[in-house]
């Protein structure tokens, strides 16, 4: 993140030792920014809020939103919106004022980016954030230092509840290109020593390199693994297939993609520890963290989260949010494009007050649309017992045809293919033309993410 294209191409041409040095320099810079001046106070405040009573939490939320509406009214975009809709952002109930605003889509925000920024803030004090949209529609905006620190403190609050402490070594499997694609020999990892991270390349992970990954993990001091569930699950699958020795770790934490049940079980089998997940996005309008009871709680102090029903899909809700910790770029009722299933009236014995989400279903477009218009989601269940499949992706074509791309495991046979077709027929019916195509690998999105369902 933040590295310019030129620096990146320069980095990729360096020898491995200098690449490790460069990763360390960048690591130190990021470490200082995230956890430097002011972080300790922010963290104390964030941890304290975890023990708020309901009334304390409500008071805090109202105060945060009031401040945020005041910040928004200093920007041209929101000023115009407030006056067009007759909203007085200073009125007594800020949530009532918020309710009067329409939901704002990412395209709208992108088009008015300049006018949403607070002109009074000095760009030198701010951090530039680049989001990489899954469909290539990125967004660039500023955030305050406070926002970045609150975000990291909130993530550490969740990690700490699972027994992790800052400073423990972590193996990271993500979308960053730390190892040049042209490299064909080990090491497929780089060291961020100041940040205590061992970055692994997801792009080089295959049946022929998996043993080197397992060895590197075992020879390191890592106590946990974090990253894209698709990559960690692929390593888990290969480790089981090849009977590879994996290190003893505390937990696997996943992010960026939704953690599928099939991935959760294969990770548990290979590493002997649970995979836990949290949900968030660069815009910082919603954060959801798994608690030690395995429930996904909304971090209600972090931002203002609304769940808006998806038309024609009872039980499904869109995630809409207000980023009240980032006064540099106020987003009010911003549509994340993500969809969740809610556990209504769920009370968790962990004591957290946050609403409980049972499934994070990922992007709204992760659905297959049948000839009759019905939308079918949660297709990951199809692959639950398919132990001989390394990875799979469902491709829907315009005319209704569905092709399942399958990366076969060593023991994959015709019987697996038949079982998979039968599972698909159960969910999609006989009308749909479904076929299976074996491939060497599943292509990732521009930002390196795995998608279970795509449209072509
Ligand atoms: Zn809980």
Image: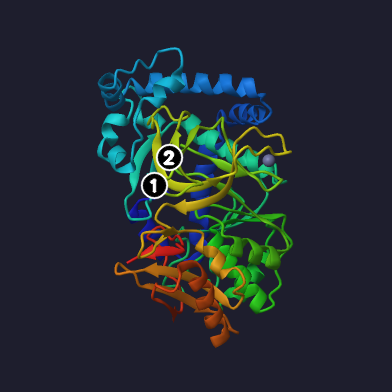
Q: Where 339 sits versus 237, above or below?
A: above
In the rendered structure, find residue 283 and report the number of the disc placed on it. Answer: 2
Q: Which mark is residue 361?
A: none
Q: Secondary structure at mark 1?
A: strand
Q: Quadrant of ligand 1?
A: top right
From the viewer's perspective, is 151 left or right of 347?
left
Q: Is residue 264 above or below residue 355?
A: below
The C terminus appears in which quarter of the rendering? bottom left
The answer to whether marks 1 and 2 mark residues whose Cβ atoms lie closer than 8 Å is yes
Rendered location of residue 379, percent (x, y): 50, 63
Q: Alpha carbon of mark 1 to alpha carbon of mark 2: how far?
A: 8 Å
Which residue is found at the position 29% from the left and 36% from the top? 113
Mark 2 packing: few (<14 Cα in 10 Å), some, or many (20+)? many
The response on whether ligand 1 sits within 8 Å of label 2 is: no
Q: How far across and how far down the image is residue 298, in percent?
A: 57, 38
Residue 170 lies, with reference to residue 348, above or below; the image says: below
Q: Quadrant of residue 383?
A: bottom right
Circle 1 residue: 131
* Percent coordinates x, y for residue 174 in the rendering: 51, 58
Q: Is residue 259 left or right of residue 443?
A: right
């Amino acid at each position: 993140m933040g590295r310019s294209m030129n620096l990146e191409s320069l980095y990729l041409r360096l020898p491995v030792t200098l690449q490790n040095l460069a990763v360390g320099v960048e690591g130190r810079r990021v470490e200082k920014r995230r956890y430097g001046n002011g972080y300790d106070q922010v963290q104390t405040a964030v941890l304290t809020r975890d023990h708020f009573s309901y009334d304390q939490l409500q008071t805090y939320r109202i105060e945060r939103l009031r401040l945020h509406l005041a910040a928004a009214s200093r920007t041209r975009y929101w000023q115009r919106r407030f006056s067009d809709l007759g909203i007085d952002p200073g009125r007594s109930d800020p949530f009532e004022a918020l309710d009067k605003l329409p939901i704002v889509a990412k395209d709208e925000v992108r088009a008015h980016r300049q006018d949403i920024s607070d002109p009074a803030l000095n760009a030198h004090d701010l951090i530039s954030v680049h989001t990489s949209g899954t469909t290539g529609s990125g967004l660039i905006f500023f955030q305050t230092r406070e926002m970045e620190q609150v975000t990291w403190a909130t993530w550490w609050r969740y990690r700490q509840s699972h027994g992790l402490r800052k400073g423990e070594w972590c193996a990271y499997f993500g979308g960053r290109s730390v190892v040049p694609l042209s490299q064909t020999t080990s090491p497929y990892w780089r060291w961020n020593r100041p940040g205590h991270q061992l970055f692994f390349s997801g792009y080089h992970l295959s049946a022929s390199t998996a043993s080197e990954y397992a060895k590197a993990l075992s020879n390191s001091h890592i106590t946990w693994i974090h990253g894209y569930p698709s990559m960690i699950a692929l390593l888990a699958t290969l480790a089981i297939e090849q009977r590879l020795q994996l290190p003893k770790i505390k937990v696997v934490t996943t992010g960026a993609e939704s953690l599928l049940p099939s991935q959760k079980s294969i990770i548990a089998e290979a590493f002997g520890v649970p995979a836990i997940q949290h949900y968030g996005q660069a815009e910082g309008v919603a954060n959801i963290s798994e608690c030690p009871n395995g429930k996904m709680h909304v971090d209600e102090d972090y931002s203002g989260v609304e769940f808006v029903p998806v038309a024609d899909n009872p039980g499904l809700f869109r995630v809409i949010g207000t980023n009240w910790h980032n006064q540099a770029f106020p987003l009010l009722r911003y549509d994340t494009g993500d969809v969740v299933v809610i556990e209504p009236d769920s009370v968790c014995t962990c004591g957290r007050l946050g609403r409980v989400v049972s499934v994070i279903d990922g992007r709204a477009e992760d659905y297959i649309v049948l000839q009759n218009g019905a939308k079918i989601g949660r297709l990951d269940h199809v692959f639950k017992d398919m132990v001989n499949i390394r990875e799979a992706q469902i491709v829907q074509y315009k005319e209704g045809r569905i092709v399942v791309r399958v990366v076969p495991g060593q023991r994959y046979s015709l019987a697996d293919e038949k079982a998979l077709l039968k599972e698909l027929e159960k969910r999609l019916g006989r009308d749909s033309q479904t076929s299976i195509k074996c491939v060497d690998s599943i292509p990732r999105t521009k930002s390196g993410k795995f998608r279970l369902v795509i449209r072509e």
